[in-house]
Amino acid sequence: SRDCLSTQFSGEPTSYTRFSIARQTDGDNSHVEMNLAADEEEGGEVGRPEHLHASMPPPRRNGKNLCFVIMAAALLLLIGFLIGYLSYRGRMQRVNRCLDGSGNCEMTPTASYFSDDGMEEEEVSGPRILYWPQLRNMLSSKLSTARLEANLRQREGKNSFEAGKTEDESTASHIHDQFTSFRLDDVWNDEHYVRLQDKGSSRNQVFIVEDSQEELESPDAYVAYSKSGTVTGKPVYVNYGRKEDFQEIRNLGVSMNGTIIIFRAGEITLAEKVANARKEGAVGVLMYPGSSKDRRADSYVPFAHAHLGTGDPFTPGFPSFNHTQFPPVESSGLPQIPVQTISREAAARLFGKMDGETCLKEWTADIMGCKVTVSSRSKMTVKLTVNNVVVDRKILNIFGVIKGFEEPDRYIVLGAQRDSWGPGAAKAGVGTAILLELAHVISDMVKNDDYKPRRSIIFASWSAGEYGAVGATEWLEGYSTTLHAKAFTYINLDTAVLGSKDIKISASPLLYSLLETIMKRVKDPANDLGYLDSRVGSDWIKKVVPLDLDNAAFPFLAYSGIPVVSFGFYDKGDEYAFLGTTEDTLANLKRKTVNLYPLMRTAAEVAGQIALRMTHDHELFLDLDRYSDELLSLQEKLGHFSGNVKELGLTLNWLYYARGDFSRAAEALRRDIENSDKENRLVRRALNDRMMKVEYDFLSPYLSPKDAPFRHIFFGRGSHTLKSLLENLEHLAANKTSVDVNEVKEQMALATWTIKGAANALVGDIWNTDNEI
């Protein structure tokens, strides 16, 4: 046999021959090696014991025939290998995911066919494989309105769930026990020691002062983080307190310095209203609830907070763990002026005492006798006394996790606020009930129905949400160095049902396509034959509501750079009037909404489908092209100011180049994903990580998280945002002298390089970077 190849090819005998079979898998070659070993001894014969030489004659061999046998065996082995490989690939790579909601979607098994070292495992009989349509239907069949109702009724008969107090801690213990009973893989709690504000020993008071002093109202409710003290000033009504509303007052020639500003709730947060009033020199602020068809709500006063930010304002940028050395600093978002909420009845009486100019028609807010201010001859003033006190409290965040079977260190987070100043049926009860139901159902699917999520699912119950997402923000601050690289989505369950007629959506553009797909497959509780997509319409993206500071998802997106979604039902133009009041009860919520529990179930199904789809698929369902669309829309808006920018000796071309770089990088990543081996764990993980980082890369790297925590250029707060750049360009077009040119230059530079940095990160390797700029 040692002369076989020599005999066939008239060459020298060869003891080692390699046949290379190229497989185009991530650029590597796989080899099949055949070793034709020769006897080491000259003239020796392979496989024959030495003691047999004398008793047995050497066998007669036909070298040519043996060589043919060996080559045929090798060829058959090769053919068998290729047939098996192609069959396996065809079985695993079935139909790609659909985006049209037709149901012919990705049929990717939830179980892996690979071992931890990336090698193929032998298929053996075992748990059944669940495909996405099966998983979606299983979730829908398991969700229970009866359990949702039972969870929500846990808050009945209790007046308050203030953060860090008895009822809040009791609810935390209940949720911990529930998570444990659901057999989640791990259940734990985080303790935070925070500084909150509570009402003082005596109630806050509002007086009308003319020749004598008359009490307008002395509410039990208060505004957290208001400055304590007494102030007096003329009243001025500024509608919603937006910048354009203040401009209307300036156009009327009304001075606001030293005044007490009156607002109605809505459009922007109270904290933003107060910040705008402070810039105008106001000494105090009053706010009354917006219009409602429920007249019973006219006498109720809502609780609120006035911190222009999230988290503990006395440890800005730092986690409030017990062992933290707190720096002697305060958040710049604290209002520094007294703030108080009043009822609509009190606001009507106050307007009745004012004798100045009548309000603009669109400012009246259904209150008769609305006035902008008092006349120049009037001696009337308003006196505001706030007695709030700062308190130190321990709060608990409760967590449970279902660990992923392939990538346990990558996770989606579902969260709900637990605390409330009043009964909080809508504010905290609905979200907490949905959180518990989803934890119960998904855990049951894993334990009893063979679902094996690739990635982990974390369920979080937050405390101190009423004070500005304090619990959630402190958690983000505590793990800021790792969360953005591990958490790929946050689903906010708060206030999921405030009405029944309309749908409110706030989300990162990365999740628009997933939401659209899911709404095509979730039935509308108000229409048995219809789906949610028919209710929101084809142009629903234009109606997406920007996240505000009062939404617990805001710090996840704007501070940590994690994609978020917040979904719920409400009645546009007829808001739930008892939110944040002592009358936010189950009875009032049921009176307001039609089919409360079916609506809760539908909201749970949307959130559950997002969580399952993001932990089931090989590829994270994050649509990069949506941010390309957002940047293209930005370019169109900027184009209106190109002439004004040129007059300053500047150009918008660099921003346009950065936008182009991002779009090309997104397209290149999409091609990489389409051409990749979806069964190669390492490749798939690397591609998913690149998609995960897109949101984080829109956080401006040129700002300190301590000084400017909300660094997202699309959704953050501050002069670094694209919204602020557009506002300055609008002012530039209106009045060149009203804008700081150097500030505009800096804004354009920071925006350009942040977008360019996001494009570079999306590309991956440095040598693939588009260096057009």
Image (tube, rainbow, N blue to C red):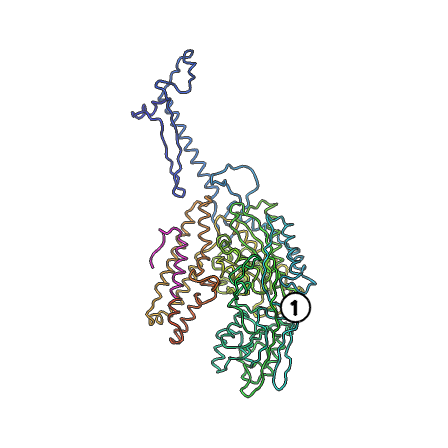
The residue furthest left is: 10
Taking the spot 57% from the left edge, 46% from the top edge, the residue there is 451
Q: Quadrant of the N terminus?
A: top left
Q: Is residue 507 above or below residue 677?
A: below
Report the magenta stretch's main SS.
helix
The residue furthest top is: 55
**Residue 192 image point, x, y percent:** 58, 58
Q: Which residue is mark 1?
A: 582
> Is 752 included in the stretch rendered in magenta?
yes
Count of labels shown?
Answer: 1
Q: Is residue 707 above or below residue 613?
A: below
Magenta residues? 748-773
> Is 468 included in the stretch rendered in magenta?
no
Secondary structure category for the residue under label 1: loop
**Residue 612 image point, x, y percent:** 55, 51
Residue 326 in view (yes/no): yes
Taking the spot 42% from the left edge, 36% from the top edge, the residue there is 82
Q: Nearer the viewer, residue 372 or 215?
A: 215
Q: Is residue 49 above or below residue 9?
A: above
Q: Is residue 602 left or right of residue 19?
A: right
Q: Quadrant of residue 162?
A: bottom right
